[in-house]
Amino acid sequence: MQLQSFRPRLLDSWRQAGWADLGAGLTVGVVALPLAMAFAMASGLPPESGLVTAIVAGFLISLLGGSNVQIGGPAGAFIVVVYGIIERHGVAGLLLSTLMAGGLLFLMGWLKLGALVRYVPVSIVIGFTNGIAVLIALSQMRDLFGLRIEGKLPADFFAQTAVLVRHAETFNPHALMLGLLCVVGLWLWPRLAKVQRIPLPDELARTRAQRALNGVSRLPGPVVALVSLSLLAALLQWPVETIGSRFGQIPAQLPAPQWPSLSWEAAKLLVTPTLTIALLGAIESLLCARVADNLAPQLPRHDPNQELMAQGVANLVSPLLGGMPATGTIARTVTNIRAGARTPVAGMVHAITVFGVMLVAAPLALHVPLAVLAGILLFVAWNMGEWHEFARLRHFTLQYRTILLGTFAMTVVFDLTVAVELGLVLACVFFIWRMSQLFQVRSVDTPLPEGVQAFSLYGSLFFGSVGKVESLADRVSPGTRALVLDLQRLVQLDTSGLEALRLLHQRLSTRGVALLLAEVNEQPLSLMRRAGFAAELGDEQFLPKISALSPD
């Protein structure tokens, strides 16, 4: 097996870098700042964890990645996953899980498994994306309504809902006003700025890219909301909780690297969280890269395996500095492209910009109301979800509806790992059932010599469809001397199907009936030869065409 060579896209494109990349990086850096803090706090981490991730992981993903314009950093999709890991295993468990997920992502790219991520059905992706969006929105109800709840909220959907209901009487109208103003402002901002719609051939990519543009203009909506509503709360002296009142001082520098405590016992407990982070990071980053390819068709298409290796390195380094998991981010990538980026230099400038703003403006961030960040995250959650897919479900098959709704429900009620596992199992079961239904055995109407009976096999003879072949012996008429199977339209045969043919041959032999195979395709014939079934039948039992047995 040939392994992926490590060659970042920057090596081939840095000569094309220009002032447009510098301007794009500055723009995206300003957009990334409030989102990085909001994602970290919603995940149960201090705001500096999000900033560190945007700086370190964002820089490494652009430096080492396989896309010209993708922006990496903390993502909304990780909020629910990270929150659940912290609740069960603590921050130390999160750092170790992220570290192991980074190694796994790098290994996936090195082994050229990037293309396999595309095989995840779109119904599963939509199901867990909508489920994550619901959970993100639920997690922001505490800050949106200004509820006074001691400690952290539980990660479980029903337990979290019960805690919110139990503390409903602590509702703060000033917090709610700020949150609603933030949401309404973010919704109105692109309409006031007259953001142009994006023409994309792929509907899912077009929808996600267009929604990612909401709140994005020459002056980013989240930044406008953050600054204006923070000033409003300060001027009116509204009694609302702020970043400073909950988290204290934000460091104006990167922390010193610290190696997380490693132990085999801890690693065994973190296998499932590690797989969740790696799978979600791979899906999100490669989906984001595909959106970028559609938005910038004049640029070289992304290399999925190099991108996974870069994601792996970023997630190996980020936890050493106290960061959270990182992946490709659609909203910031779209902003980057619209701002004129053409090379990975823009992504590196974005990370440097976040670092520069953190050095200068860290004390000012302490006065940002948490209700404003809740409003930003509610808007992010709304844009994440493919809500129109629920209305379109009636146009799709029962299998599609079951997978999408099952994945959605499992994401909300249990967690993302269970949801993806269930979705993949359902997808496999339905695929097997569908393929077994497509396989058919039909009688041949061609005139044949007396005592000869023939059937044609259509489709794929595999473990899910062997029952139709096993019953052929019961369909052989009395007095039949030979049974012919026309395999011209048999496109694929697996070992279970081959065993069914062998058992059919044995049952026919006990009754003195010969089994003949006509027009066997290359793949079934190769398996028959390798398994010894061709030798067991004998060369004379293979016919070039079924017409060779014509009574004429």
Image (spheres, grey):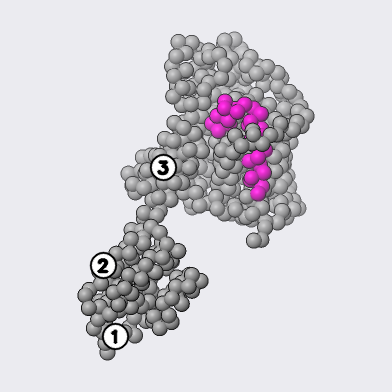
Residue 254 point in image, percent of width and height: 75, 29
Q: CA distance from mark 3 to mark 2?
A: 41 Å
Q: Which residue is mark 2?
A: 474
Nearest to viewer (mark 2 / mark 1): 2
Disc on the earlier residue, 3 or 2: 3
Disc on the earlier residue, 2 or 1: 2
Q: Please rate how many residues cluster around mark 1, counting C-alpha atoms within 10 Å: few if below 14, some from 14 to 19, many from 20.
A: few
Whether residue 544 appears in this view of the structure is no
Whether residue 361 appears in this view of the structure is yes
Q: CA distance from mark 1 to mark 3?
A: 52 Å
Residue 512 to residue 135: above or below: below
Q: Is residue 507 rendered to the left or right of residue 148?
A: left
Dots 1, 3 in contact, CB < 8 A:
no
Question: Farthest residue in the front direction?
Answer: 510
Residue 517 to residue 355: above or below: below
Disc on the earlier residue, 1 or 3: 3
Residue 550: image tag: 1
Q: CA distance from mark 2 to mark 1?
A: 24 Å
From the image, give the main secondary structure of the stretch colored magenta: helix
Q: Which residue is mark 3?
A: 404
Whether the magenta-drawn stretch holds residue 101 is answered as yes
Quarter of the view holding residue 221: top right
